[in-house]
Image (tube, rainbow, N blue to C red):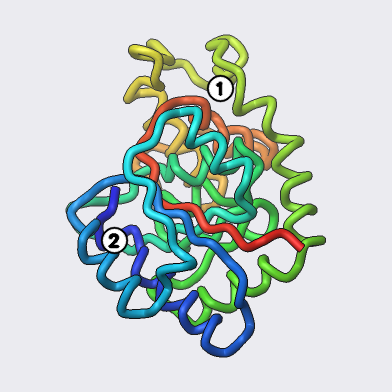
Amino acid sequence: RLVERKGHTHVLNALAHLRGTGELADFVYHIVGEGPMDASLRSFVETLNLGSHVVFHGRVSDEERQRLYQESDVFVMPVSQDPIDKEGFGLAYIEAAAAGLPSIATRIEGVDEAVIDGQTGMLLAAQDERQLASAIATLAKNTELRQQWRDTLAQLAPLATTTDPDALKPAEYTGPRVFTRGRPSASFASWISTVMKTSRGLPTASAPKKPSTSLARRMSLFLSAFPVNRTSRWRASRP
């Protein structure tokens, strides 16, 4: 959704800075989705003189979304904390990971369960536009690093693309149903979140036994095959 906490304005500011300094001149930032900030974001793009670099897609079909994934190099969504509208489990990052896209994200609860810092993406301080600009420039220029992270994601992808409940359900889960109407049940999603927190030593109300690193990574890709609200994609022209 196009809402303030998703960080679109921070991405635009970072891109404007990179273009102004000459660090990044040729890029396209794809913004996908609808929301209350649509008009203000379009106006902000014109204010920053980024009209030739930003494309608003609005609501897209599954096919169009998949095409954008395939044509993109990095998924960027530096979300911020909101006391009411929280990020939750970070499904958008998991979906990007399943498509082979490294993410530039924020180190906040929920997001840090979906992005493995330094292996499938970067976790940054919230609302730090200088750090965000540096991360974008790094991944735009370092094709070797992008490919390394893509290779890591490719190894994990089989776990993210299956829709077989028996394949997805780990032995440690003892709750009721895994899926409800084609999506993970509330109990299963809650269990995944607890597992991910425990794997990182974070406090939980009732934590199961600490899972292995491989299980934690598998958990972070479970939900990628299911439809969620999408927001933004950024693509630097390929060298």
Nearer the viewer's eye, disc 1 or disc 2? 2
The amino acid marked with disc number 1 is Glu
On the question of residue 216 being in view, the answer is no
Q: Give the image location of residue 142, x and y in percent.
A: 76, 68
155 over 200 or under it: above or below: above
User: Which residue lies under the disc numbered 2?
Assistant: 5
Name the side, left or right, on which 53 lies relative to 81: right
On the question of residue 98 being in view, the answer is yes
Q: Give the image location of residue 173, x and y in percent.
A: 50, 20
Total labels: the figure holds: 2
Q: Return the residue nearer the eye: 92 or 193.
A: 92
Image quarter of the C terminus = bottom right
Name the residue located 48 percent from the left edge and 36 percent from the top edge. 65
User: Which residue lies under the disc numbered 1?
Assistant: 172
Q: Return the residue nearer the eye: 22 or 110.
A: 22
Name the side, left or right, on which 232 lies relative to 123: left
Name the side, left or right, on which 167 lies relative to 233: right
- Residue 9 lies in quadrant: bottom left
Q: Return the residue nearer the eye: 139 or 89.
A: 139
Outermost front residue: 52
Name the residue located 49 percent from the left edge and 30 percent from the top edge. 223
Outermost bottom residue: 21
Q: Residues within 10 Å of mark 1 (few under 14, many from 20)?
A: few
Q: Give the image location of residue 51, x and y in percent.
A: 40, 69
Under circle 1, the secondary element is loop
215 over 35 or under it: above or below: above
Under circle 2, the secondary element is helix
Name the residue located 32 percent from the left edge and 74 percent from the top edge. 46
